[in-house]
Image: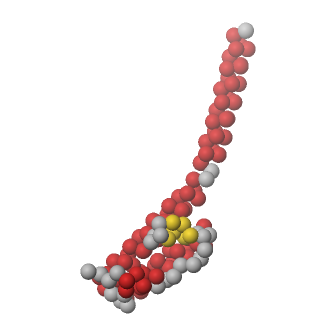
Amino acid sequence: MQTKLQSRILGATKVTLAGAALAGFLLFAGTPSLRADDNCQKRISRADHRLHESIEHHGRESRQADSARRQLHEAREDCYTRNHRWWDEDGHRWRSDRDWDDHDHDRYDREHPPQ
């Protein structure tokens, strides 16, 4: 009798552990895409900030601003290629159309010149 009880407990433990392992696998299966989105958002945000800083410190037509503009374009392009969306830092939202303007900060700079 003791053996049957031990066998049932062992069987129930195996089923429970297998269920927990399957649940854990299913729970974390979507995590890499979230990390990719976070990386894209951070990369675009940083590149956007660098462009704003370059324009403010060196001017809209400077070598530094052109370099920062290229980095922002590359970050947007990379995110769109991998995820079919890109982070709009100024609008604080994800965009699914490949409709960014590489010179959108030039217009902003004219409307809000540095102090």
Please name whichever residue, 4 or 40, is drawn nearer the observer in this view of the structure: 40
Q: Position of residue 30 (x, y in %)?
A: 61, 53
Which image quarter is the C terminus in? bottom left
Q: Which residue ends up furthest to the bottom in the rendered image?
A: 61
Q: Is residue 22 above or below residue 72?
A: above
Q: Residue furthest left?
A: 115
The answer to which quarter of the image holds residue 19 is top right
Q: Nearer the viewer, residue 1 or 82?
A: 82
Residue depicted at x 40% and y 81%: 108
Q: How many marks?
A: 0
Which residue is pictured at 62% across the width and 50% down the height?
A: 29
Position of 13 compared to 73: left or right? right
Q: Specify the color scheme.
A: secondary structure
Query: In which image quadrant can residue 52 be found?
Result: bottom left
Residue 67 visible (yes or no): no
Is 58 rendered above or below residue 22?
below
Q: Residue 23: x percent and y percent?
A: 64, 40
Q: Is residue 64 left or right of residue 44?
A: left
User: Looking at the picture, how far across and down is residue 91, in whole percent?
Assistant: 47, 70
Q: Is residue 55 visible?
A: yes
| Residue 79 located left or right of residue 23 | left
Expressed as whole percent of the image width and height from the top left, the position of residue 67 reads 41, 84
Q: Residue furthest top?
A: 1
Closest to the observer: 22 or 44? Answer: 44
Drawn side of residue 62 relative to residue 15, left or right = left
The residue drawn where x is 55% and y is 57% is 34
- Rendered-image quadrant of the N terminus: top right
